[in-house]
Image (cartoon, rainbow, N blue to C red):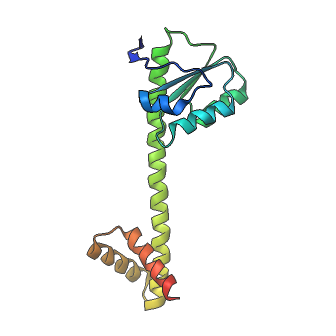
Amino acid sequence: MQLGGHELTDVLPLDSALSPALQRGKPDVLLLEARSPSLDLLDRLLDAMGSTAMPFAVFAGDASSQAIENGVRAGAAAYVVDGLEAARVPAILQVALARFDFISGLRSELGLAQQKLAERKFVERAKGLLMKARNLSEDEAYHTLRRMAMERNRRMGDVAKSVIEMAELLN
């Protein structure tokens, strides 16, 4: 069955085993229709997805702020109140997929920024250790770390982490 340019692969009752169906169907997007999606149902859906996040849209009758917040916190890319109408589904699917892609991009950027911040902290700590151990200036300590990274063809954060680990081992 076609639904807004997408093929409907499976319809499951809310109390069924979700994981096997997700593995079998490998959907691009999930549609969840529930009068009032409970936290338990949303948790089961997330558990079924496992480590493979995928966009999902919730079609519900419950317009309470708590229900909507629960859906959004669970990762719903769309929360539509008052039913699943075939004419509206294509646009809702497009929004859900676009929002999921956008949020995934933001998460990737956040992860990269967090990694860079952690590396910067390692570099600062390693510089301090080198300054103290070798009586170097901050600039000299930085260039020492940089040279070590280039010689070993490793990231500066990794070299800094190794310096910190070695200093902890020696102390």
Residue 135 visible here: no
Q: Say which of 74 and 127 sits in front.
A: 74
Which residue is located at x 69 percent, y 22 percent? Answer: 36
**Considering only vertical position in the picture, is 112 above or below 128?**
above
Q: In this orientation, which residue lies closer to the viewer: 35 or 167?
A: 35
Residue 105: quarter of image: top left
Given residues 160 and 146, the one toward you in this image is 160
Above-or-below relation of 73 to 142: above
Task: State whether residue 73 is above or below residue 68.
Answer: below
Q: Residue 117: x percent and y percent?
A: 49, 62
| Residue 17 can be seen, yes or no | yes
Residue 46 position in % (x across, y down) = 56, 37
Image quadrant of residue 137?
Answer: bottom left
Q: Return the x and y of residue 31 as percentages of the image width and height.
A: 52, 22
Q: Nearer the viewer, residue 21 or 167?
A: 21
Instruction: Indicate whether 166 appears above or below 92.
Output: below
Give the residue displayed 54% in from the left and 21% down from the top. Answer: 12
Q: Residue at x 49, y 15 (%)?
A: 89
Q: Quadrant of the N terminus?
A: top left
| Position of residue 143 measured from the top left corner of the image (x, y, whole percent) | 35, 78
The number of numbered badges drawn on the structure is: 0
User: Which corner quadrant of the image does residue 61 belong to?
Assistant: top right
Residue in the picture at 40% in, 17% down: 7
